């Protein structure tokens, strides 16, 4: 048990000590391992111990192929015959295979393909039901309207209510949250089964309503949920699923799968997920993402074939543009125009979306009303939007009766709708007819469609249901592209190639370009280009698409953050903004300009009073530990909770009782100096004292640690009951001391020392206060405390650019700024964010950080450095000579 | 100008102090800086100083838009009229624009497109010349053979000789080297203009010879060269181009441009370059890569249109497969077979390539002979290969008369070559006829082509000319795919769709799949899939291609390293191997198992003798600086060169002369105690001493730094000649001291103090030795020394997986392992590489690092930690009391 505990601690150490990042996963880890240890620990003797460690070692490594080292079962039953050993070995081998990445990825792909297909199927049924209702009631326009409007309102309201009740985390897109999670932040309850159910059902209903909503963002979230749940499930077989960094890698792959199986676009899916979720991408995950996304897309399309929807696997929105001459070089300016306009449009969309959210939030009267009736807002928005699209009403001017998918198919059509002169001859087959209105030009229809859908989509995505904005934006972009294409076709009816051969313009190609450009502008990605190729099954327009997407990105990125970053800001998620493109100040600003110089720290030789004061004044999650206030040499960082537990232990009731007992014993001894009869309780007491010291040394004194509130493992509890029955019973009514009252809101469930029956807490309040004062003056013993010995350090001259890189690479929360071992400042995510947003603001105003100007004034730095080194050196020289130590100085500073 | 030095130093600091990564750039910097400081020191007055700083401040910020702060020229000419100020301001603004990323990227794209097009054009001419010669001599087979063989031999020999003479760095692909450079390693002379010229001309000749070589790898190198040169050129306008991290980002974009403009495949280019060069990829570079690669691909194709080669921009190897039913689901197993077989083939290719190189190296007699006549090997190989492909000879059975490009075009043809029964009716138009042999089946031709080209390509890529292996492998893959496709077509002449409609099998599609799979297997990338889509202009086979590529990768990655990694190993470039896929031991091995515990360090209070000894025994590039041998608190790391310069300064001739002068002065003083006449030469001497001290404080004492030899910039040189005619003449015959003789091979060109005419070096050798001994016993003054105050630190329990991640993320070379501030070990790239290759070997044998087993045996670590903390603490307690310092102890340890 002892060894197991340390092993476990070791594991935990490895995970926590780097960069002080703590995750929920740790709890799971600790629990399982404790359970394992419990089993094995029960019947352990000293000789058995090494064997158990072997076992453990094996268990840990069992996912590795063919380890030669001792097979544990052989030890237990050496007489077992060879064949049975082989059988077990094979069985073990098979189980170990479960730990392989590819099994996990295949399973993930399979599950996601099924989910995607089922969701699509249900959405299709929902939409058909609406059409059927609408079609069946064509005798009465009012009834028709009622049916047209009520149906989506009911679905959206249900969706909003359902997610609200089951898991409010399921609301919205999910990409911003995944971006944050992949950065290392743990969002609570974000990857649970409840959220999964809420997201899937909520999404199906929301999309089934026919509102302009998308499924891409939610699918990223759903895939991540799947991966997290699958990990949990697989961890029943293999231990490797508990590793935190592995889980992050799998989540990154899951994001790719989400996009991939949603659009049957494996390559675009991988790229899109990289662009929207990562700042730095591990290329080894790329391969994982491709594998899972391809498998998923494959199954997703195979399901369509099996369902007889398709004859073979083809693209989702197949186009049939001519291959030999897709576009003329002279058409490129038109594509560039689409790109630039899309850039502005995308920025406008993001702005509009944020404006609506902020408007709704600010309007207090509206807000109070809406908060009371949470489902009213979705219902109202749905009512408004579906009224606008009612086909016999205004909807006739904007192809209102087409679903999103149908609109897209018609927009990508390879025929020209409005050829000059021969517009009448154009045969409107199928859905394309919806764009044709007897009185109105097709251009007017397109313009109306774009304008109406634009605000509708921006509005609809603010409804609190699981929904994405990618698909609506994609459709709007396609419509815009089509508009430009049709205009071009009308302008140059014979094409613009002057070489004799007539190649008429293909407006469908413009639609493809527009779709990629607008969705790229809104999401700030270039991989939408790849997504459109995969969606349409044609890559002939690659150059126009790339040019338009890049121009759109350039424009949109200089105007607004991406939609996902905008949501991150609205939701105030802990995320580091991107450095802009081409802002050179980032190379010029230094850490010393942005760091906080007034660092809270504790010294190695401080007393508990200092600790107390520091905890009272500082609100940081972790504190720097320096050697002394003069040297300021950084030794490590300690978590706040650790310090609190140190303090609470020092002032806790168990120690006071110990003190009382000792006092009583001393009293007794003093009384019975002459009568030196070996009293029986003196023996145990002495050993008790020794034991206490030893246990402190071994740092097995960790119960009082109020680390992330998790119940202590039953294993440890039980074994502690078995092995040291009279020791350490909990004292729930533990009085943590007067001085601590104002420190800890949640009193740590200190399982302190036993309330020895023979001692009664007879101290008065005044005595307690005195005792506490005395205790506070003692020097802190850091031995029982978990110290992060290598917190991340930066130099004061590190540029903002580099700092940003390091923070985002390593997912740091804060870093200490040191100068030759001396702590001189600290920089946290907050300062960094401020600095970046100060230098790279949206409106183009660049603020120079206040201290930047001082930096330039001369050769200060190297002088500083020399001076500091000098100090150190002088100090060192002095240290070798006898000198007086002034503790009060360090005390003052450390407060 | 004075401030310029400090500015530059600031930049330099920022570059060097992070992680102790030192690059060649430093040398240039240091020298320039020294020169500047020297110059400016001349005429500096206190009042002038602040003004100059202002000027500088502007210079630094001039790339920022519209800075309001004082325009320097206004200071100089306040009376100047407004308009002229505006003009200058606009001019400045325009110049500042040059610093923008997009200008750089557009220029890069443009240049690379032009280079690519010109190279292609020249290659085409070369190949046509060969054909013309061969065609013109059809009367005589022997003459034909001579022409066919001599031409490539001459070209290859010229190419090999040319690159050998001009820049041997230009040999080979360039991708392995770029991978190393992007990791932060500086390869000498790798990005110079000479290399550029050698690479471009060598590549053109090599490819013009018709050997099975590719241009992809070299183009990555050429693009990087372009970027580096362009950076240098642009830095004449804006200062931002000198930033190291920016240059690395631009190099990453350049790699994408290289692939992009080579294949006109911007997306595939970006992805391929990411996969082959990066371990962790910054998503912000992605956007840069796309921008530049798209622009480059666009220009590259536009050039073709302008040259009337093409009517419009289309794919390079356009295919015309049918869109409606590209493949049947039941064909997927055949595609999977292609993938798996390609995986084995790819691994075999890498193995074969390495085998040939190693064979050539090992055969000492051959080697000695070849080394003597360096051009013999290329000539022999070329002779062999061109003999084999001689069309009237063996070449007739393997389409020998087709160039690589022609072969690829024919292989991707959408017609079936061998339909059962109707093979004769197939009309062989154009180049396809080459595959048809009157006696031999098309299958035999294909098989022969594959087998012959396979070893030929593996052999040809070992020729020391600039060449890549991607394209030959691509063609072989296409041939293999075609073979499978033709077989399928022969097996199922009516297609395998059972639904009634006849969809015959498209062998061209199989060729596409095969090409992607084999090239993916050889390079270990999945983005070859995207490259084939862009090359062929069709994405209809996306799923088969993805499946085949992924399977091929899975097989190849488990058998062999990628071709580039293989070359890295052969060339012994400093690179960190990838962690395998699914090897779980990496989570189990800790840094403490692999670290070197016997760290060489120096203490803050050590004397020069210790320094000397450490330098003699340790061969590390940098040494750890600890507070003292007892505390072992890590303060920073110092470069070896810095220490050497410290030592050389301490023992150098200037100091000895100073000593002699002082001794003489003391002597004089002693002699003339009474006659206190203020002698004139006492004044200058005193001031000299003061000057010396000041200059040390300001750390302008860096001339003795033996940094990489780079000539100073001419501009600086000239000004330095003008401004300091009498100061600081160099002393080339400087005697660096006896003790140093064995330390420095290259004696630092110490531009020390002036050899005062009035003192003569009259010390005897014995006196010098004595003096040096005395000097060595002095304590080291680190003030003039550049210390990296925050070298990267790890905890001993960090897992191998995490260590690998951090090393590759940050491009580390070594990291110190600390435990609460105490240095306990060091881990460098070497140890890490060993550990990874030990645990993740190619042959599936896993070696556990020697210390790993100790780790599991109990609670050692946390106890250790507590003990260490205890030590620190005890020490601290002692430190506050008077105690004796034993310097000898630390001395012993530090040796």
Image: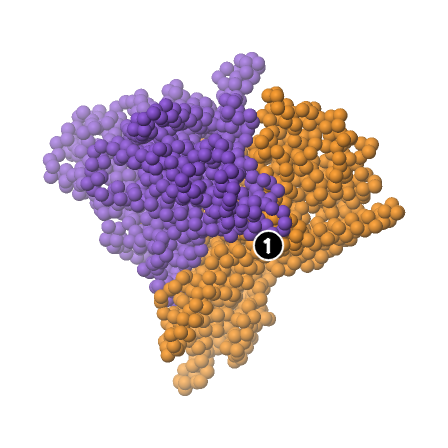
Chain colours: A purple, B orange
Q: Quadrant of the N terminus of chain A?
A: top left
Left or right, B385 with reference to A554: right
Q: x%, y% of residue A603?
A: 30, 48
Q: Residue at coordinates 38% horizontally, 25% vertically from top-left?
A: A135
Q: Secondary structure at mark 1?
A: helix
A620 w.r.t. B860: above or below: below
Q: Chain of mark 1?
A: B
The image quarter in which residue A638 lies: top left
Q: x%, y% of residue B884?
A: 36, 54
Q: Residue at coordinates 58% horizontally, 31% vertically from top-left?
A: B324
Nearest the eye: B299 or B685: B299
Q: Residue at coordinates 24% horizontally, 26% vertically from top-left?
A: A729
Q: x%, y% of residue A557?
A: 41, 50
Q: x%, y% of residue B227?
A: 56, 56
**One can see residue B425 in this view:** yes
Nearest the eye: B837 or B285: B285
The image quarter in which residue A396 lies: top left
What residue is shown with label 1? B112
Question: Could you tell me how many numbered marks the image carries?
Answer: 1
Q: Residue at coordinates 70% horizontally, 32% vertically from top-left?
A: B416
**One can see residue B30 in this view:** no
A140 w.r.t. A514: above or below: above
A110 w.r.t. A278: above or below: above
Check disc 1: other Cα within 10 Å, few if <14, some if 14-19, many if 20+: many
């Amino acid at each position: 048990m002892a060894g197991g505990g340390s092993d476990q601690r070791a594991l935990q150490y490895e995970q926590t000590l780097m960069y002080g990042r703590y995750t929920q996963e740790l709890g799971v880890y600790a629990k399982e391992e404790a359970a394992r240890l419990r089993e094995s620990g029960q019947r352990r003797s000293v000789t058995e111990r090494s064997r158990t460690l072997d076992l453990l070692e094996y268990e840990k490594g069992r996912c590795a192929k063919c380890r030669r080292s001792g097979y544990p079962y052989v030890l237990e039953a050496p007489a077992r015959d060879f064949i049975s050993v082989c059988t077990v070995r094979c069985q073990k081998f098979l189980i170990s295979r479960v730990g392989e990445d590819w099994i996990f990825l295949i399973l993930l792909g399979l599950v996601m393909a099924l989910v995607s297909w089922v969701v699509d199927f249900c959405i299709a049924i929902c939409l058909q039901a609406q059409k059927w209702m609408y079609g069946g009631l064509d005798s009465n326009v009012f009834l028709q309207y009622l049916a047209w409007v009520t149906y989506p309102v009911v679905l959206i309201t249900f969706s909003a209510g359902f997610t609200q009740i089951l898991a409010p985390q399921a609301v919205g897109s999910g990409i911003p949250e995944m971006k944050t999670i992949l950065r290392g932040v743990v969002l609570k309850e974000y990857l649970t089964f409840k959220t999964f159910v809420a997201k899937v059902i909520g999404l199906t209903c929301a999309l089934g309503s026919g509102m302009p909503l998308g499924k891409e963002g939610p699918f990223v979230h759903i895939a991540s949920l799947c991966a997290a749940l699958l990990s949990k499930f697989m961890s029943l077989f293999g231990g490797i699923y508990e590793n935190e960094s592995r889980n992050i890698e799998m989540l990154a792959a899951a994001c790719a799968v989400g996009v991939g199986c949603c659009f049957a676009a494996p390559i675009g899916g991988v790229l899109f997920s990289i662009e929207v979720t990562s700042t730095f991408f591990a290329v080894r995950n790329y391969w994982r993402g491709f594998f899972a996304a391809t498998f998923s897309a494959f199954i997703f399309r195979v399901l369509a074939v099996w369902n007889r929807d398709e004859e073979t696997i083809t693209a989702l929105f197949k186009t049939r543009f001519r291959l030999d001459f897709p576009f003329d070089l002279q058409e490129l300016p038109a594509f560039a125009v689409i790109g630039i306009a899309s850039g502005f449009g995308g920025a406008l969309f993001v702005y509009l979306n944020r404006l609506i959210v902020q408007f709704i939030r600010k309007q207090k009267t509206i807000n109070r009303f809406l908060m009371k009736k949470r489902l009213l807002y979705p219902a109202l928005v749905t009512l408004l939007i579906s009224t606008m699209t009612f086909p016999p009403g205004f909807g006739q001017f904007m192809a209102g009766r087409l679903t999103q998918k149908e609109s897209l198919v018609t927009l990508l059509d390879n025929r020209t709708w409005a050829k000059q002169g021969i517009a009448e001859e154009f045969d409107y087959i199928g859905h394309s007819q919806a764009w044709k209105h007897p009185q109105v030009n097709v251009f007017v229809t397109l313009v109306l469609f774009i304008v109406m859908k634009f605000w509708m989509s921006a509005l609809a995505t603010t409804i609190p249901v699981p929904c994405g904005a990618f698909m609506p934006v994609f459709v709007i972009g396609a419509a815009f592209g089509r508009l430009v294409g049709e205009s071009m076709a009308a302008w140059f009816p014979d094409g613009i190639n002057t070489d004799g051969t007539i190649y008429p313009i293909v407006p469908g190609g413009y639609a493809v370009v527009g779709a990629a450009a607008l969705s790229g502008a809104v999401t700030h990605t270039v991989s939408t280009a790849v997504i459109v190729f995969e969606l349409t099954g044609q890559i002939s327009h690659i150059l126009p698409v790339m040019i338009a997407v890049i121009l759109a990105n350039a424009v949109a990125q200089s105007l607004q953050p991406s939609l996902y970053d905008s949501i991150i800001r609205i939701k105030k998620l802990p995320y580091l903004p991107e450095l802009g493109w081409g802002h050179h100040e980032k190379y010029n600003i230094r850490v010393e300009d942005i760091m906080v110089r007034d660092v809270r720290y504790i010294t190695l030789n401080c007393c508990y009073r200092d600790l107390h004061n520091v905890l009272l004044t500082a609100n940081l999650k972790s504190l720097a530990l320096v050697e002394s206030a003069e040297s300021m040499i950084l030794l490590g960082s300690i978590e706040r909770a650790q310090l609190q537990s140190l303090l609470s232990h020092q002032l806790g009731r168990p120690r006071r009782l110990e003190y009382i007992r000792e006092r009583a014993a001393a009293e007794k001894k003093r009384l019975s100096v002459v009568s030196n009869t070996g009293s029986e309780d003196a023996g145990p007491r002495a050993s008790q004292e020794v034991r206490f010291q030893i246990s402190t040394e071994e740092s097995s004194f960790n119960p009082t640690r109020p680390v992330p509130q998790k119940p202590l493992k039953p294993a440890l509890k039980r074994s502690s009951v078995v092995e040291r029955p009279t020791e350490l019973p909990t004292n729930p009514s533990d009085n943590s001391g007067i001085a601590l009252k104002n420190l800890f809101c949640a009193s740590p469930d200190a399982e302190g020392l036993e309330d020895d029956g023979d001692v009664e807490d007879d101290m008065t309040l005044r005595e307690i206060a005195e005792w506490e004062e005395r205790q506070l003056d003692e020097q802190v013993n850091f031995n029982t405390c978990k110290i992060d010995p290598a917190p991340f350090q930066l130099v004061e001259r590190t540029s903002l650019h580099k700092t940003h890189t390091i923070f985002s690479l390593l997912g740091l929360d804060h870093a200490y700024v040191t100068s030759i071992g001396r702590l001189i400042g600290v920089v946290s995510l907050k300062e960094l964010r401020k600095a970046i947003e100060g230098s790279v603001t949206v409106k183009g105003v660049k603020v120079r950080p206040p201290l930047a100007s001082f930096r330039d004034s001369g050769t200060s730095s190297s002088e500083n450095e020399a001076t500091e080194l000098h100090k150190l050196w002088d100090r060192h020289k002095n240290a070798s000579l006898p000198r007086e130590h002034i503790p009060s100085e360090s005390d003052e500073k450390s407060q």
